Image: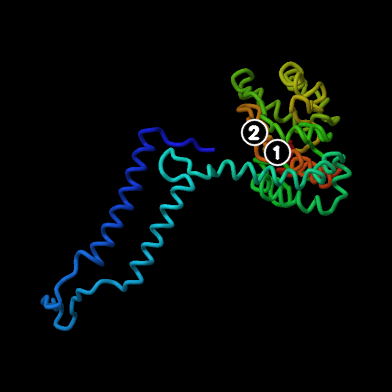
Amino acid sequence: MPELPSSFWGGWIIVLTVGSLLVLVGLVLSVYFFDRQPDDHAEVVWDETLREGNHPAPLWWFWLIVVLLVISVVYLLLYPGLGRYRGTLGWSQGHQLAHSEQRYADEFAAPHATLLGQSLSELAQNHLAMDAALSLFRVHCGTCHGEDAGGVAGYAPNLTDAAWQWGQRDEEILASITAGRQAAMPPWRMALGDDSVTVLADYLKVIGTQAADGPQYEQAAATFAGSCSVCHGASGEGKPALGAPDLTDGYWLYGSSVDDIAHSIARGRQGRMPAHADRLSEVQIRLLAAWLVSRSGSTLPESPIQSVRDK
């Protein structure tokens, strides 16, 4: 809830507010009672036919303004509006919001408890819950991952396939949404040199296949074992606990060409999935995770082109 202004600015607001009301009162009184022109006052004629009158506005305008002034004064007495004065009712937007949130929590406590007690696979069978999850996804996730969760090549991963960089178990998906993820692929250009980076990128195109055992890849395999296997595994299968992707599935977020892979090795990658714990409730996070489980496939596509892996 915003803090009330300081004593100085609070006093200044009072001066401006009260002063404005007094000026308005004086102006209205002067128009209707103190500034009347005599009836024999000479009329001013503009453009031959346009005459300047000297009669005040209808009297009902006066009473309307008086009523509005009274309402304004009553409002300023009951509600905040005069600097640091909180009003006799003690109302505030923060208290009103807290009251509404508490009323919402009380009203939906039982349904929420039921949803929290179900596994993600059980939630995925609840059509009403999944309709709500789809709406949540489009509002909070669709900007990056697309409305169909298909991802954006080179930017955000596809969430409908079987490739999950940070793991596809229920608790791992929930952790990704709740706390977010921060990629930490360091740049290797200075350590390896341009030539070694290119050779290593060419090797990663075939890693996990029999072709990777060829003599032309011996140097690249040694480089991988010494510099990459700690995170990506001895065979390049990846380590979800570290967020190190599987390099053997042919599924690449930042491009599958040798140049794209070399760019990732040389300059590193720092992709970031923002945390949503402060944006969504626990129920909403579980609904999103359940929706992703229901959408996630069990196999990888046969020919991924510029596809998405970095989850």
The quarter of the picture where residue 117 lies is: top right
Q: Position of residue 281 (x, y in %)?
A: 71, 40
Q: Please identify the quadrant where the N terminus is shown.
A: top right
* Residue 254 vertical position relative to residue 188 in the rendered view, above or below: below
Q: Residue at x 76, y 38 (%)?
A: 251
- Name the residue furthest top: 226
**Disc 1, disc 2: CB below 8 Å?**
yes
Does residue 29 appear in the picture of this structure? yes
Give the Cα separation between the discs numbered 1 and 2. 10 Å
Point out the tag, 1 or 2, that comes first from the N-terminus. Answer: 1
Q: Position of residue 125 (x, y in %)?
A: 88, 49
- Front-most of residues 20 and 244: 20
Disc 1 residue crowd, few under 14, some 14–19, many 20+, Cα 10 Å: many
Q: Residue at x 36, y 62 (%)?
A: 66
Q: Position of residue 31 (x, y in %)?
A: 24, 65
Q: Residue at x 78, y 40 (%)?
A: 286
- In the visual, does 160 lie left or right of 46? right
Q: Position of residue 111 (x, y in %)?
A: 82, 46
- Front-most of residues 79 and 282: 79
Disc 2 residue crowd, few under 14, some 14–19, many 20+, Cα 10 Å: some
Residue that badge 2 annotates: 271
